[in-house]
Image (cartoon, rainbow, N blue to C red):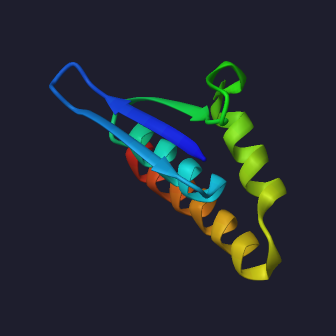
Amino acid sequence: MYTIRVSSPHGVDADFTVASAALALDLALRSQRAGLWWTAELAAPDPDRSRLLSLQALRQLAAALARGEAERELVDQIEWQHEVATSYALN
């Protein structure tokens, strides 16, 4: 399980717990594009074994854990969507 915590100085404060690394990546990237702060944590049954994940670690996990063609395409779509949205922001 992955926990994504999203916040901002303007009162945004939300926690999302998801089972998919791809969905966790999507939430982190969407939060980043919205200018929100986020942290990602890989939850473990033992709280001492939980660990924070960087964006790069989320990307690697999403790619490594994608099972089947549909999940691999989903991860590619998430990355493509982020690149397109980021390029619009730069123009």
Q: Please state the horizontal and vertical placement of residue 52, each as a whole percent of the image.
A: 63, 25
Horizontal side of residue 47 vs 34, given as left or right:
right
Q: 89 and 41: which one is in front?
A: 41
* Res 32 quadrant in image: top left
On screen, residue 22 versus residue 37, left or right, reads: right
Compared with residue 50, is residue 78 higher up or lower down, i.e. above or below? below
| The one of 60 and 67 positioned closer to us in this rendering | 67
Number of callouts? 0
Closer to us: 54 or 2: 2
- Measured as percent of width and height from the top left, residue 84 is found at 51, 58
User: Can see residue 91?
Assistant: no
Q: Is residue 72 above or below residue 79?
A: below
* Residue 19 image point, x, y percent: 59, 56
Which residue is located at x 47 percent, y 47 percent?
Answer: 17
Where is residue 43, by image quadrant?
Answer: top right
Q: Is residue 79 above or below residue 27?
A: below
Q: Is residue 11 visible?
A: yes
Residue at horizontal 72 percent and vertical 24 percent from the top:
49
- Residue 78 lies left or right of residue 38; in this view the side is right
Q: Position of residue 85 (x, y in %)?
A: 45, 54
Name the outermost residue toward the front: 46
For this rendering, which residue is in front, 78 or 47? 47
Residue at 71% x, 35% y is 56
Q: Based on the displayed image, in which of its 4 quarters is residue 37 positioned?
A: top left
